[in-house]
Image (cartoon, rainbow, N blue to C red):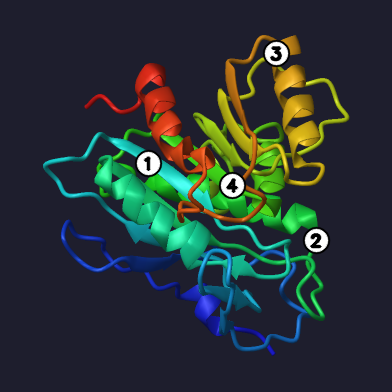
Amino acid sequence: MKLFAFLFPLLLLAVDGAEPTRVSIWPYGVPGSEDIDFKAEKSVLHQNERIGDYTRVSQVHDPSITVYLPDESKASGTGVVVLPGGGFRFLSIDLEGSEIADWLNAQGIAAFVLKYRLPKDEGSAYSFDDTVADAHQALRLVRSRASEWAVGPDRIGMMGFSASGETVGKASVTFDYGDPDASDPLGRFSSRPDFQILVYGGYIYEEVLPESVPPAFLVVAHDDGNKPSIAVDVYSKLLEVGVSAELHIFRRGGHAYGMRSLGFPVNSWNLMLKDWMTDLGVLSK
């Protein structure tokens, strides 16, 4: 069964002070979706004693962004495409999505929470490349409507948590600057993030990185399995090619906490992120 809604995406205008709005990112059809048996999107409340309950979304077939705009008086002109984590099996849509967007808005940053295709979802026919394609397409979409959403087209970053940190890392290397002859009008816009934020996740680079990789902010806890070694490897490879990067490794914190309090110093990572973005020059109007 095909979703003809792909051809007529929900293009709702996001107005300052209004509720967050959803926008499909593939207005001319999702690539490779022709032979997929679609199921209804699923949303489940997951109980967790450590960080509190959060919502898991799965069965994503119509990738979209939800647009969260800051108060006009606070707006810095910077935007961030936020990719919730979930091991490519689900999306932690509030823990690493809407809650992050609310914090970004409080800093004057527009947030665009991406629902992307999940390669490890039950019965999924998607691949990691599809996930990366969704990330690139989301960036193109935001750039195409930058003036409408009051963000600078050269001030749009990308943030990924856990597994989606892999996606952001890969998307930050495999981007293009747009094809003026693309049949999809969005394909004419650049898919390069202007900066990348990797929260307890990152892509293990096997290739030599180009100098055009965007600046990076990385944060991880020492007691988070192999994630610290991945973060160090990513940082080292960025350093080798002269890409500006900042890495924070906290003594404890574990995994998948978003911005919820654990009572540990790791909960200050967002304050360090704000300092980094200020130093990068993307929080000044």
Q: Amino acid at mark 3?
A: Leu
Q: Nearer the viewer, mark 4 or mark 1?
A: 4
Horizontal relation, residue 278 to residue 214: left or right = left
Horizontal relation, residue 181 to residue 274: left or right = right
Q: Nearer the viewer, mark 1 or mark 3?
A: 3
Q: Residue at x 38, y 31 (%)?
A: 274
Q: Which residue position holds label 3? A: 239
Picture layout, residue 160 above or below residue 92: above
Q: Which residue position holds label 2? A: 127
Measured in 3D between alpha carbons, the distance from the residue under mark 1 to the one under mark 3, in whole angstroms, is: 25 Å
Q: Amino acid at mark 4?
A: Gly
Q: Position of residue 51 (x, y in %)?
A: 53, 64
Horizontal relation, residue 190 to residue 270: left or right = right
Q: Which mark is residue 79?
A: 1
Q: Position of residue 254 (x, y in %)?
A: 67, 50
Name the one closer to the observer, 214 or 186. Answer: 214
Considering the numbered disc 4 on the image, is that residue within a helix, a strand or a loop? strand
Measured in 3D between alpha carbons, the distance from the residue under mark 1 to the one under mark 2, in whole angstroms, is: 27 Å
The first of marks 3 and 2 along the sequence is: 2
Please, which residue is most extreme toward the right here? 206
Picture layout, residue 34 above or below residue 143: below
Considering the numbered disc 2 on the image, is that residue within a helix, a strand or a loop? loop
Q: Quadrant of the C terminus?
A: top left
The first of marks 1 and 3 along the sequence is: 1
The first of marks 2 and 4 along the sequence is: 2
Q: Residue at x 51, y 58 (%)?
A: 96
Q: Amino acid at mark 2?
A: Ser
